[in-house]
Image (tube, rainbow, N blue to C red):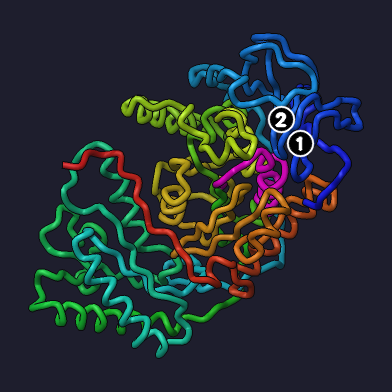
Amino acid sequence: MGVSTKPLYIKVHPDDNSAIVVNEGGVEAGSKFDSGVEAIEKIPQGHKISLETIEEGGIIRRYGEIIGYAVKRIEKGSWIRESMLTLPTPPSLESLSISTNVNDVKVEQTNRTFKGFKNSNGTVGTKNILGITTSVQCVVGVLDFAVQKIKTELLPLYPNVDDVVALKHAYGCGVAIQADDAEIPIRTITNLSTHPNFGGEVMVVGLGCEKLQASVITNDASSILLLQEKTGFQNMVEDILKMADEKLKKLNARKREDCPISELVIGVQCGGSDAFSGVTANPAVGYASDLLVKAGATVLFSEVTEVRDAIHLLTPRAINEEVGTGLIREMKWYDHYLSKGNADRSANPSPGNKRGGLSNIVEKALGSIVKSGTSPIVDVLAPGEKVRKKGLVFAATPASDFVCGTLQAASGIHLQVFTTGRGTPYNLPVVPVIKVSTRSSLKREWHDLIDLDAGTIATGEETLEEVGQRLFESIIRVASGEEETWGDKWGITNDITLFNPAPIT
């Protein structure tokens, strides 16, 4: 957002008694806003100003919802700091309304297409990658060595193949393989191995004695290579290259073709959020999400801890009772998971979120859920489950960026849209990630990491709809291979990070 000397704030809802300061550098004491409110102290950009005097114990509102109660009297024009709020009680999961606010979505007939890779099982990819799955951490050193040789010696021979990705993880042995919730990491690994971007060419490298046997990941014995069956390091590497060469030959025959937009599965996520996330980038993502759903595509939104305190706004959008109870089931599961670790919802937000103006998880959740747009929620996925239905889907994941990204990839997303206010170089090895900044200053500072700026919404340079439309068009171009994200340009990726709530033995 451009530098402005005129004091500006954003009030989201008519009932709000707090607003966030827009100006870069914040506003000084004595600054007067058009509403007549005067700042009585310096307030940083993105932080909240009190629009009225709030008595001790009084309600503090943002997004038209209660985000906390005043610890002490807050004067009109004050900076509402994190320490001035106490958390409200989370929405009860026993008395939520379900399917009471469902908007009908008529899938519109469209001639719009994207250039994708069609797979024999009916799925479509947005990249052409050789994915090599590991069944245990023990093999990673050997596989890393082999992958470097594949990239330097083999990949140049197959120009239609984009990359070789080793799906490395810390699971596989020393784990309670039959324990409750062990199905989550196992399902994630298995589903990642058949991601549409891998073109159906599964390849698994295992050790041989691990608890997670390679045959659990794939029943195709010809696609499994076990190191304990090899005679020495060089033989291991040679056999990995030989199998990779066979797979690369098949992948190289793939070509991009026109595919309907309805084949796309898009994940949305936020990380390094700030107070602008819920009023610029996330609503723009929500608008693009609605456009995708209307075109028949699938959109996944996630992050249980950043949904829990706004769940009362989501269950009414569940398309039926089954989906509504699925949302509640995933909230209950996570409540129990956190309680086992003696953690609670106050563990989120992060210090950076707070420096960006977010006071607590309630405020963060209210700004997070708007990425889902206004479409009805048609399905709920447990962590790492494959997509089953087209439309807007809640895929239950932790809020951790890389864990959420890993689980959404396992669910089958082709591309992820990631919003950030504080900035992060986060990127996924399996799918492209479009990073959207909440503030124009971040786009200027990180001009070669941020793909799209939504900060123009705050200053009125663009409407929410205009930015959302720009994002929609960018999604189509990136999915088609016509536009490269900065993360992919630089070749930076985060590790595959499994969610394993089961015991390690």
Indicate left or right for 204 with 78 as reference: left
**Residue bearing mark 1:** 21
Range of magenta residues:
270-291
In which image quadrant can residue 453 be found?
A: bottom right
Q: Position of residue 64 (x, y in %)?
A: 72, 25
Residue 249 in sight: no
Q: Is residue 141 above or below residue 155?
A: above
Indicate left or right for 9 with 486 as reference: right
What is the total number of numbered labels drawn onto the structure image?
2
Disc 2 and disc 1 in contact, CB within 8 angstroms:
yes
Residue 464 in sight: yes
In which image quadrant can residue 233 be found?
A: bottom left
Q: Position of residue 319 (x, y in %)?
A: 58, 36
Q: State yes or no: residue 280 in magenta.
A: yes
Per the model, the C-alpha gap separating discs 2 and 1 is 6 Å
Q: Is residue 157 above or below residue 380?
A: below
Q: Which mark is residue 48?
A: 2
Closer to the camera in the image, 264 or 68:
68
Q: Residue at x 70, y 22 (%)?
A: 61
Q: Earlier in the sequence, mark 2 or mark 1?
A: 1
